[in-house]
Each structure stands twice: as structure tokens, then as C-alpha cells.
Image (tube, grey):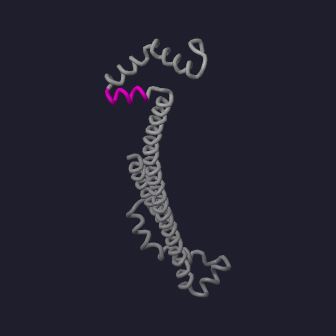
Amino acid sequence: SRDGGGSEGNRNSQTSLWKRSNFGALEHFLSTTLTASSKVKTKLLNPIGVSEGILMDCQSEILQRQEELDVDVMTLRLLSQQTDAWEKEQEEVIKKCQSNVRAAILKRSQMARKLMEELSIFDQCKMGLGLGGDVFDRAWENATQAMSEKGTRDGNPNQNLLEKEVLSTVSECVQTLSSRAQTQGTASIE
């Protein structure tokens, strides 16, 4: 040190240096005039305090974003559950449609089987030889006439009754699926 030699001299030189720098007066002035909040603020303005402040701000931002993400996760879970439920509803509608189409085809096949049972063995043999087609045609026409009359009232008289029933069933299914899809889409958007 420039101001002294030994440890005693070093202490004296530090005291002398302290007095010449006027830091003592500044320290006394600051400690008597600064408020408690100003002292805390001053302490926080050191590099460690600044780092702590930045970290606290970052932590606060992370917590806020975490809360927003938690809401997003809950929303996505809700949408996923709604979509799963909607998928099950759609599967049920499609299965019902398939069942109704299958029932219409079975009804028509049972009608054909019943017709064959009502034809005499003689008429069946003639049909087997290719001679009794007119007998079958008349019997088939009689068997379907009651159902056809209903069909002609409901639409095109040239359209096959089975075709009408299947188209009606599929059309109803498509309308139901479309309506439910629109409702689900609207609910998901809201």
C-alpha cells in the first residue's frame, strides 16, 4: 500500500484512506435519509438482486403460462371426450341403418320363399323346365301388389319396392348423420 507499511500502519492507512474518500459521510447520509423501501430497492439493484428479480419475473411468467396450458389441456380432453361420444353415436346410427337395410332384404327374401312354398309342385316343375314363368310372374305380382300399391302412393311407380325401402332407410340415416355432425361441429366450436 502507498500509505503505510505494517499491519498497524496498514490499518491506519485504511482509516486515513476512508476519511479522505468521504465514503463514511456518504454512508452516514444514506443510512439516515433512505427509507426502508429505498434501502431494499438499492440492495436489489446489485447484480445478484437483479438476477433474482429476473428469475422471479420468469417464474411468474412460467406459472401464468402453465395455468393457460392447463386450461388448454382440459379443453382438449373435453373435445376428445365429446368426439369419442359422437363417434359412438355415429356408429350406432350406421349399425341401425345396416340393420334396417338387412331387414328389408330379409323381408323381401321371405316373401319370395313364401311365394315358392305356395306354388304347387306341378308349377314349380314347369318353372324348372322353363315352361311356367308366367305362373311365377302372376304369383309374384299378386304377392307384391299390396306392397306396390303403397309404393306407388309414396313415389315413383316404376321404382322397385325393395329399392325404395333401402333408399328411404339410407336417406334417413344420411340425414341423421348430417344433422348430428352439424350439431357436434357447432358444439365443438363453441
Depicted 115 relative to depicted 13: above or below: below
53 or 1, nearer to the observer: 1
- Residue 27 image-quadrant placement: top left
In percent of width and height, residue 99 lies at 50, 70
Outermost residue to the right: 129
Q: Is residue 54 magenta?
A: no
- Residue 4 image-quadrant placement: top right
Q: Residue at x 59, y 12 (%)?
A: 2
In percent of width and height, residue 87 lies at 49, 59
Q: Residue at x 40, y 54 (%)?
A: 179
- Report if residue 43 is visible in the image: yes
Outermost residue to the bottom: 121
In percent of width and height, residue 137 lies at 55, 74
115 or 183, nearer to the observer: 183
The magenta segment is: 35-43
Q: Main secondary structure of the magenta part?
A: helix
98 or 55, nearer to the observer: 55
Q: Is residue 39 magenta?
A: yes
- Report if residue 159 is visible in the image: no
Tally of numbered tags: 0
User: If the image is split into quadrants, where does the N terminus sit?
Assistant: top right
In percent of width and height, residue 44 lies at 43, 29
Depicted 34 relative to depicted 130: above or below: above
31 or 14, nearer to the observer: 14
Depicted 40 relative to depicted 75: above or below: above
